[in-house]
Structure formats: C-alpha cells, structure tokens
Image: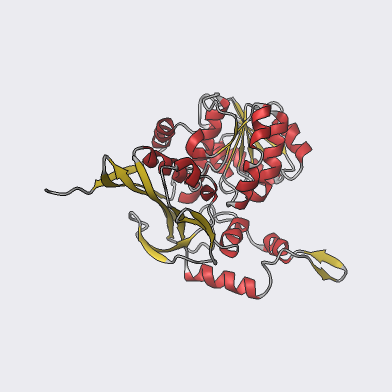
Amino acid sequence: MRILVLGGAGAMGMVTVRDLAETSEVSEVIIGDVNLEKAEKIAEWAGKEKVSIRKVDISNIESLASAMKEVDAVANAAPYHLNLTVTTAAIQTRKNLTDLGGVYYMTLKQLELNNEAKEAGVTVVLGCGLAPGVADILAKHGADKLDRVDEVHIWYGDRSFEPAKYKWSFRTVLEEYTKGPVVYDDGEFKRLPPFSGKQLVDFPLPVGERPCCYALYSGLATLPRTINKGVKKVDCSMSYTEEDELRIKVLNELGLTKEAPVKIDGVEISPKEFLLKCVPPPDVKAKDASSLIVEVKGEKNGLPTKITYSLVQKFHEEYGVSAIAYLTGVPLSIVSQMLARGEIREKGVLPPETAVPHEQFFQELAKRGITINETVETTSKLA
C-alpha cells in the first residue's frame, strides 16, 4: 500500500507517518508538505527506508491531484481550512480520503460534496482523529446498544506537566474560541457565545479535574442524524485555562482575530492571517496527558441506561510526542489503511461513526496501546 499524508510534517501528521511506516502492509508513505526541510527530519524520525517526500501545495488542486495519482489512499493532516480543496482534489482523482475534521462549518461544506463523491466512486471519511473521530465512533457504538437515546455528551480534557501554550494548530484554536460553540439541544441546533457551558469535569488520572466549556465540534454536524433514536441533546466540551480565555479576549479586543483586510502602507492584509503567520508552531513534544469521556444516556429494555466510555493517554515516550498528537495521528493512520485495503465500501462523504467498522477500529487502537473502558449503568426498581 502507498499512502500519501498531506501535512505529514506537522504535529499530528508526523505521528500518522510513523504509524504507517511501522505497519508491515504499507510499502511507502509519502509526506506531502511544502516544508521540505521539516519533512526530511520527520522522514528520518519515522523510518527513512519507507518514507518519501514530495513538495505539495495543499492549497492548489492541480498540485494535490498530481501527488494523489499513484497512491492507494490519502490521509489529510493539513490545517482544516484546506479540507474543501483536498476533498475536491480527491474526488477529481478518484482517491479515497480521510482527514482530521473541519471544525463544524468546514465539515458542513464537505458534506455538500457527498453526491459528487458517490458519482466518482470515492469514499471520504471525515474527522478521524481523537475528537472528532474516536469520540464520534464511541457515541454511535453506545447509541447502537440502546433502544432509545436521549442525550450524548463528549468531554475532552488534557493536562500539561510543563509550560505549553497550545498543542495543535493555532488556526483551529482561534476558530474554536472565537466563533462560539454549536450544541444540539431539545432537537435544535443552537449557536452559543465563546466559552459557554463552563463546568468542572473529573477525567481519569493523571488528567484529573479540569474546567471545560462547550466546543465548536465537527461531530455535531452529523451525530444527531446518525444516532437518531429520538436523541434530544448532543454536545461536546473541551478543557481550557483562564490563560486561554484571557488570551482570546485580548486578541479580540486588539482586532487581531478579524478576517476583513486592513490597509497598511498601501498593502492589504487580514489581521487574523497576519497573526497566524506570527505564532510559533504547536508544541508537539509537550509533556502531558489527555483524556476522552463519551456518555450516552437513554433506555434499554424499558430501563434508564447510561453507557460511558473513557480513555486516557500519557505523553508517548517512544515517539517523544504529546498525548494529543499520538491520540490524533494514530486513528488517521488506521482509517487510511482501511481505505487503502478497501475495507470501507460505502461511497460518498461520510462521518466516521457510520463509515468505520467499530470493533476492528477498537482492536487496532488497542494494538497501539490505546485502550477504552466501557461502563454500563442501568436503573431498576426493587419492587
């Protein structure tokens, strides 16, 4: 199998590259990135004998199509704002694709290409990292076990054990914290102000108790429909710090999150794009721990039932990467291999919860040290 990893020199993509390189069935991993110097370092780190490098302008359909021609599947770990271009190129070249999610609004745009993908005989599986990805699959897995589903709640939390401002693309951070979350409540989609839904969540150790708020989450674009069964409430929350909230507040007040261009000495530039050019890359080597909790509430055999899934991951010592990088990059590798082997047969632009075979996916995660706990609680009367 030959698999192209777009953004393979990035914080999450590098993990995907290494996991693929360590898989015996994969004959070649192609890092498709514009940063060739960094790609060379990742190739050395991941296993040079299997990894090749190709300069790809991920914002350009022609460049993408040329890179996709001779591969069996494409794993897109590039920043989410490029997802629509990548999806279009995959459909045009008739190559199966998976990515890390579109922070809700981009996901909606990608879903509009469903018919085009079907007609081309292409499978595009959206959002196959941790959250979205593992979280959505767990939500559907739990829902499938119930007769009726009332609520689905997803919580992601992390704890850094050394200073780290952020561990994934700052573009994504800005999108999540400035546009405000979307929740599905009482059967309706609702947009809320940033940092809404503040709550304390007790994650498995060593993450422990963390403050969380509602997130702008890709899975909300599909989970209410794919779960169905009468579900009235679906939401996702992620941990944050007071520093996160203060930083975003200051950037907003300074006008640095605005997208409309301003003119400086005759040159027009978007304050947001200027900011994104200035910020340093994510700290992929931050010593940390990450956790995910997915809770599905409903009814089974006439009794109120709650199914809870949880996982926790520490800094990955062997790879030398943060827990979130490992938990995000590995699922992308697994699903890209499923696509390359033809194990996902449905065509179209699909969410992970319906496209990915659940049990096989969980087994592949476990092989890589990512174990998931399931707890089922049923309430019944004594007499």
One can see residue 210 in this view:
yes
Tell me: 318 left or right of 382.
right
Q: In terms of image quadrants, where is residue 261?
A: bottom right
Tell me: 337 left or right of 366.
right
Residue 22 percent across, percent down from the top left: 51, 32
Which quarter of the rendering shows the N terminus? top right
Residue 349 percent across, percent down from the top left: 60, 36
Tell me: 79 left or right of 365.
right
Question: Residue at (48%, 47%) from the top-left corner?
Answer: 224
Question: Residue at (49%, 33%) from the top-left corner?
Answer: 356
Question: Residue at (48%, 39%) from the top-left corner?
Answer: 353
Q: Residue furthest right?
A: 266
One can see residue 294 in this view:
no
Position above or below: 192 against 350: below
Residue 291 percent across, percent down from the top left: 40, 52
Tell me: 108 left or right of 381.
right
- What colour scheme was applied to this rendering of the protein? secondary structure
Q: Which is more toward the observer, 35 or 114?
A: 114
Position above or below: 137 against 215: above
Q: Which is more toward the observer, 293 or 266?
A: 293
Question: Residue at (33%, 55%) from the top-left corner?
Answer: 205
Residue 128 percent across, percent down from the top left: 53, 41
Q: How many marks can you see?
A: 0
